[in-house]
Amino acid sequence: MKRRSVLRAGLALAGTAAAGCLQTEQQSVRSPPLPENRPDAVYYPSHVEGMTMVGTGTTGDYRVAAMYSYPHRFWEVVGAETTKHELTGEHAMHLMATVWDPDTGLVLPETGLSIELNADGSLVSEEVIYPMLSQPMGFHYGSNVQGDGDGTYTADVSVGAIPGDGVRTTGDFRGKFTDPGTVSLDFEFSQDRLQDISFERLDNAGERGALEPMEMEMLPNSTAPAEADLPGDVRGTATSGDANFVVTVLEEPPAGVDAAGPYLAVSARTPYNRMIVPAMSLSATVSRDGETRHEGELTRTLDPDLYYHYGTALDGTGVASGDTLELTVGTPPQVARHEGYETAFLEMDPMEVTL
């Protein structure tokens, strides 16, 4: 049976389990053994956790939410190599944050984010938080952090600007997300509150598939548009490293692209849940009758209609039916992974789409 989990707000259970599909785990256990023979693809993790909402706030162009759960292992990605971050006795919680555009509800990757954690007025932890992918949350920021026992905490969440030299903003996003900001969120933390968060093991761990995205009214997820909702003419989908790449062609570039001609946009998303897969280098070659018509890197772009995508204008090239598009990943997504994603989106072979 493929058990899928839905995280609810606050101290919610991670979904409603069908009889016999879940095994309740003792709350003191945080890291069940990893599934054996994990595929080089997205798979059901060993367990699923709930989380507690810390709070939300607005700073400048950003809406920010912070949450926490049990400390848990995750994998940092540098280049094509992963480094596993294990739990230590100093970790009090896994602190997470999501940043989004309040006008559109679109989750924003690549802002850069740090959190300063104070307990009863004293600094407890100060560090940059990793951009991450998890199955229930999709893209977010998170890390295991130290604490100072039970008490009143303040999380100062500092959001950086979208890097203009790496990520382009187009359409109504032009001129936005250029200034950093900070949100201060107060919350009560105790071991009892932490122990009340749900923690359940899955009996289909290691099988290919994914948990369903969480459902929280106050918090958007990072779901990419469905193919039918993408602007332009969707020409096809390719798969590499278990990520899906949907290719669409617009008659002209969105406002903010300093070039003419048709616009090639590639929306990279996870299988099963369509979560955006950001922060990779992706290049495109368009060929016609064996002759290269366009070759170059695609620009990471934030657009309110296309959402986060990789795009370029085909200035002077045009697109004809039957043209061949080759997509090549130079560097895989530079985001950390929760269990179930750590073996995917790493070894990414070139792809071809007939336009």
Image (cartoon, rainbow, N blue to C red):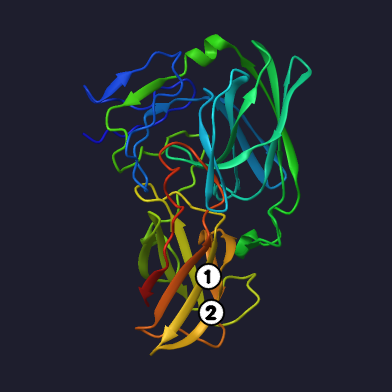
Quickly name the residue at label 2: 295
Q: Does residue 121 lie above or below 262 as drawn? A: above
- Image coords of residue 203 (percent x, y): 27, 28
Residue at screen point 42% across, 48% down: 344
**Residue 283: which disc?**
1
Q: How many marks?
A: 2
The quarter of the picture where the C terminus appears is bottom left
Q: Is residue 45 above or below residue 148?
A: below
Mark 2: secondary structure:
strand
Q: Are marks 1 and 2 in contact (CB under 8 Å)?
A: yes
Q: What amino acid does circle 2 point to?
A: Glu
User: In the shown orientation, is residue 60 left or right of residue 14?
Assistant: right
Q: Residues within 10 Å of mark 2 (few under 14, many from 20)?
A: some
The residue sitting at 40% across, 85% down in the picture is 320
Relative height, residue 330 to residue 233 (above, below): above
Return the residue found at the far right: 122
**Nearest the camera: 133 or 120?**
133
Q: Is residue 305 at least partly visible in the picture?
A: no
Q: Position of residue 123 (x, y in %)?
A: 77, 22
Quarter assignment of residue 253: bottom right
